[in-house]
Amino acid sequence: MNRAWMHITSLLVLTLLAAVPASGQQKPTLPERPAADPLRGILQKKGYTAVPLLKDTDRPRFNIDCKIGTEVFRLHLDTGADSSLLDAALVKKLGLKQGDKIESVAIGGTHKSYEISLRGMSIGDFDTRTVANSLGLRSVDYSKVNVDRKVQQVQGALGNGALRINSAVIDYSARTLYLRTPLDGLWPEIAGTWVATGGREEGRERKIDPKAPPKLEFKNNRFHLTDGANQYGFGMHVQPGKDHSTLMFFDPEQELAKELVYKAGGRMKVSDGKLTICLCLDLTKAKKGAEFPDDFKTAAGSGHLLLEFRREKDVEQPVAVADPLRAALIKKGYTAVPLVEVGDKGFIVECKCGTEKLRLVLDTGAEISALDKGFVQKLGLKPQNDVTATGFGGVVEGVGISLRGLRIGDFDTRTTINALDAAAFDFTAINAAIVQHLKLKPIDGLLGHWDLEILSAVIDYSTRTLYLRTPLQSLWPSIEGRWVATHIHDDGQERPLDPKAPLKLELKDNRFHLTDGVGDVNFGMHVRSDKGVHTLLFFDPEKELGEELGYSTSGLLKVAGDKLTVCLSLGGATNTGIPDDFKAPAKSGRLLVEFRRDK
């Protein structure tokens, strides 16, 4: 049987990103990777495995090194793909069989893929065999999207399905993907020993012997049930549901073997210190189609056992605290943006452009953000240049556009840059499939990798939250405060220091205030960071959120402990553009100043 209209996004490979002009006076650069990852400790305590995200040398997106058996290959990170994908050539090389055909609509037109299943895959150091006995993906012809890649070929995509079930956290600034098994997410709720208080079996009430009640223990990621003379010990995989978890049991010694067969299964829910579990402890004796219970009932002849438990001993519950990841990110200046989950298809980000509302797919696989051309016309935006998108359906032409600003939840991009660069394409066919076949609301475009990386995005699947912050907020802790000049070089000449009216710099309230006791300048500033050098773009702070914003001047900044150096372009000379180094030669119109902290 063929399944149609299942794969809607995984949309863009924008081949002419460089052709989209920066609407401001400088094309945004991407933040450098920090030496340490401040979120790693928080997430490792939650059972996460850290997987490095590799900077694509060809395009702005992230890749991941993966392995199937001895075959090493590379996937790109794609939250816009509802399923993970493998190149058809790699599927053939691995000897995997193709299953049902799936027809999908994406930018470039309709394309086809095929369902495939494999025993397991390593995503960095994360082994999917600890999640399930087999992994479902789709086989797709990647020749079209790889045709213009000169350096790095990709053999597929890690999509929303795998990221969702493994409660992924994507940290753009640290270039790290965090994954954990569903069991790791559930474990803090269930670990320990439980005593049965009641139950049903084969449609009848199950009497509990108060002197020898059934006991259930979760220990070392294993399931142990003692029921009279019967003892069961299993390894377990978990598939999370809305208000319950499906359990699959197996011989724990076989979890990483070439083949893994589930020996039993069940459905479990935990609420208010009470655990309820419906088990099928012998799949061979279960009623056909009921090998894994789909409810908490035990009809006659079903082979199901329902037991209710309480903890053997009262366990002191930890004091409820705010999500530690959220708390850490808010402290670091991030804004939390809720994500709207669209079934199992991915996330929608609700945005505003002026007074117009729009729904954007969160798509790390799209190299830049894109809007539907109909929405672009509605906003009255003028096309700037031609761009080309290459997808599985082929090549489609679009245009580059510039947006003054975009509100992403409560985050306003006008605090980051004077205008956003994006692309406009025709989303008509995609939206027709979304509305007619998936019965969902149409989308207005995509929020892509380029903007997510500039804004140091963190994507938390478990809480359905996107976190964003400006490059200035990232830099701010190391520069905030007062500074006193120790060396000044002004337009080719060294300026003596005046001890009575020293040149001082104060960085406060996101503003740049430079004074020498006689005159001063006071700017708002936007920041672009690259390899320890920060480009400063200055403007009238009262106009930052206005309908238009022009940069009045610019500079460079670098900081090392208690030493800060700035090179400012003050205008009025032959070179008034953004400084490209920390020099102030004659007739350059530049001011070079070294500062120490004002203690």
Image (cartoon, helix red, strand yellow):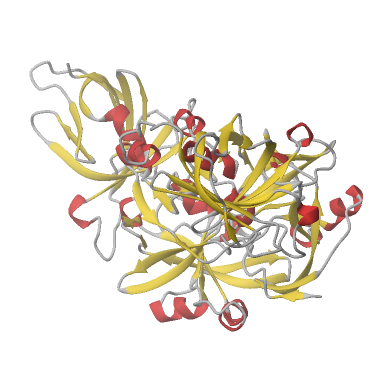
Instruction: Give the image quarter of residue 50.
Output: top right
Image vertical order of residue 395 relative to residue 96, above or below: below
* Residue 451 shows in the view: yes
Closest to the observer: 574 or 322?
322
Q: Quadrant of the N terminus?
A: bottom right
Percent coordinates x, y for residue 74 in the rendering: 74, 44
Closest to the observer: 49 or 151?
49
* Residue 587 shows in the view: no
* Numbered disc total: 0
Answer left or right for 510 relative to 163.
Answer: left
Instruction: Give the image quarter of residue 570.
Output: top left
Instruction: Give the image quarter of residue 147.
Output: bottom right
Percent coordinates x, y for residue 257 in the rendering: 82, 36
Percent coordinates x, y for residue 388 in the rendering: 64, 66
Closest to the observer: 247 or 84?
247
Image vertical order of residue 537 relative to residue 306, above or below: above
Answer left or right for 312 relative to 307.
Answer: left
Q: In which quarter of the image is the C terminus?
A: top left
Image vertical order of residue 332 relative to residue 62, above or below: above
Residue at x-position 42% and y-position 31%: 313
Answer left or right for 179 relative to 100.
Answer: left
Answer left or right for 476 relative to 378.
Answer: left
Residue at x-position 34% and y-position 33%: 318
